[in-house]
Image (cartoon, rainbow, N blue to C red):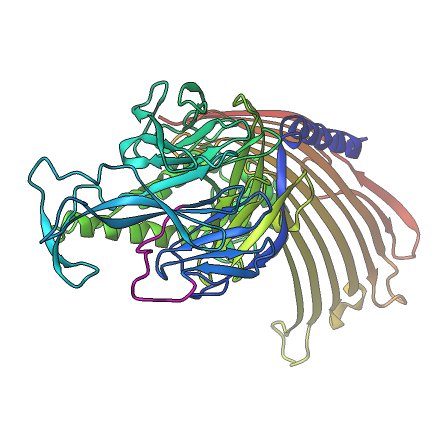
Amino acid sequence: MKKSIALLFMTYALFVWRADETRAVSFLKFEQEFSGKGSTNGFFSKNSHVAFDAEGNIYVSDADNRLVQKLSPTGEFIMQIPKEKTVDNILKKPGDIAADGDGNIYVADITAHHIEETADPKIYMFAPCVYKFSASGELMHTYFVDAVDVRPKQVLPARLIIDEEGKTAFGVQPKGHDRELLVDVDSQNQLYVLDRKRSTVHKFDADGKRLIDFGRYGAGNGEFDRDASDIEIDIEGNVLIADTGNHRVVKFNAEGRFMLSFGKKGRGDGEFTKPLAIAALATGEILVKDSSQFKRFLGSPLAFVIDVVSPSGQGVTDLYSTGTELADSVLDSVRSRSSPFSFDPTQQSDLDALHRRIRLLEEVEYRRYYSDYYDDDDDKDENQKEEDEDLKARAIRETIYHNVIARVQRFDRSGRYSGRVIYEVDKTSADEHDLAFLTLDSLGHIYLRDGSDLTIRQYSIEGFTIKPSHMNALYNTRVINVDSDFTEDYEDIDENADVQDELNQFRLSNSFLLTYNLSERWNLTFADVLTYVEQDERYITPPKLEDSYDFETQALTNTVAANLKFITNPNPYRYKELNLYAERIDGTTNLNQNAIFQDVNQQAQEGEGDASSFAVGMNWDVLTKVNLWLEYSDLNPAQTSRNFVRRFTDVDGNLFEVFGSRNEAKQFLGELTIKF
């Protein structure tokens, strides 16, 4: 009955999770890996941008190598621009890239444009631009978003340069001449250029004629911030802007009229923390990747266990001392160590119960402090201080984060949230620790790049499945065998032993811990600890042989614990979580005591004992600093380690007494903790 209740409890909890999460959560399926570190034929530098055409071909602009490459959908090299490396390479610092339906390639760059009416010396205007190349790599057109064909109307700094004829000329570099442009094209091969720093979108027709400009700086309708990070044209020709600074997506129609915006700052469904990339699928669905990350904190190889089973740090020293406390310590994260359901409640302090939640909150503040810390050295300038701060924060993050879970959210064409895709990067894995988001494509693929060797991994989206990559497990076995011999000669005149005590103690424990990230906020922890203990003792007293006995005992205990955690608010400044847990302890013990010398004494004792305790509970952060803990437990036994039945025989071997001890308690516990 009790096992059925526990099963029902956890089944209900998982049902609640599936009703809220599974219908909306998808995972990634690895498809292929391509590219890597290099300078040609399918290899690139780290400073590169990626785009795709309707057939799935891959286009990469490489700023360090000043190249544009085209690859097949499987990552095989097709062509590059320029075809040969030359000193007069038109590409200076190629940036964002796009491809139209005819295979033409658009690359954002920086150039020096000659003002036609100037000569002796010539005057060149440096400005951002977009180059249009044909499918075979010939330059077709150069698009400018700034006025570059007129003389400057004000005094601007200029520097001497050498023109293409080897003559001295002047190069004018107005403010923002090297700013970044983002590009995309629609089904009619019309080019859209997002001028990030000026919060403007420029639209050009297929022949290079400027059609309209739209957008402005701000946070209202039709406005976006100066750090917008992506532009995407959907199948209907509408324009989507990743308004990073305002934590939203802004949508315009093809004529530049504002249609809608969706999203707000946060980590919940339909909320963004600095959206980074957008992909519009042929189905009308919109994928949005933001910079929010959900981290599992760790500090050492054992910290994974500690973090899962005991966020308060309790039980740390016990995990590998005996092994038996592991399963019990699972519940330390959600209930008081002073609970009567602990292994040895008489050794626990009520003070631990009072401060468990307080310590957890202080740990969050501790991490936040170190994430924001920098060395206040008066001898360093502000830039150096900021660099030191970034380095320290990065070092701390790499130390304490074990797994990083990221998400890509899904929306319909009206901006309504419809689900999300999550993926996990194991920061302790040699193969995965350096993976970072790269881009999305219109087929719904997600691309991650390894920051070390620069290989690119392509993933498709699949429904909710059990992912081994989201699972972490620990198995520990411990064996202790002790042989003790004790001999003592009492106060007499001979040297013969009066007591000979031979004791053998054997202990075997097997601990298994499994934690599974069901999503970025849901985590399931399961622990099982099986312990076998055996003790054999021969106690001989030659002066009184009738008091000599042989004692044997065997005990088997199995503890199963499960905890379902939901992080209701992952913001470290407002962190809250909900835990639902269940625990079951079953044990059995057999003991036998017999007189060694049966001719003088046939006294014996034998007994059996059992235990079957059960508890379910909830630990809920009602508010950030208000925690509620509720627990129902069926303690059997409640006051002893076992319920025993013992049988005693006298010196003649006759049964003369049967003793039984059974105690059970059902209790409900509640605890409210408030931190001021």
Stretch in magenta: 83-96
With respect to residue 506, does 427 lie above or below? above
- Is residue 337 something one can see in this rendering? no
Residue, far bottom: 495
- Location of the N terminus by quadrant is top right
Indicate the position of residue 521 as horizontal and vertical percent values.
Answer: 55, 35
Q: Please indicate whether residue 139 sits to the left or right of residue 632 in the image.
A: left
Indicate the position of residue 282 as horizontal and vertical percent values.
Answer: 60, 33
Q: Please indicate whether residue 248 sits to the left or right of residue 586 in the image.
A: left
Residue located 65% across and 80% down the image: 494
Residue 32 picture quarter:
bottom right
Which of the two residues, 78 or 35, is positioned nearer the viewer here? 78
Q: Main secondary structure of the magenta part?
A: loop
Q: Please indicate whether residue 463 sits to the left or right of residue 103 in the image.
A: right
Q: Please indicate whether residue 147 sits to the left or right of residue 537 in the image.
A: left
Indicate the position of residue 246 as horizontal and vertical percent values.
Answer: 36, 28
On whether residue 375 falls in the magenta region, the answer is no
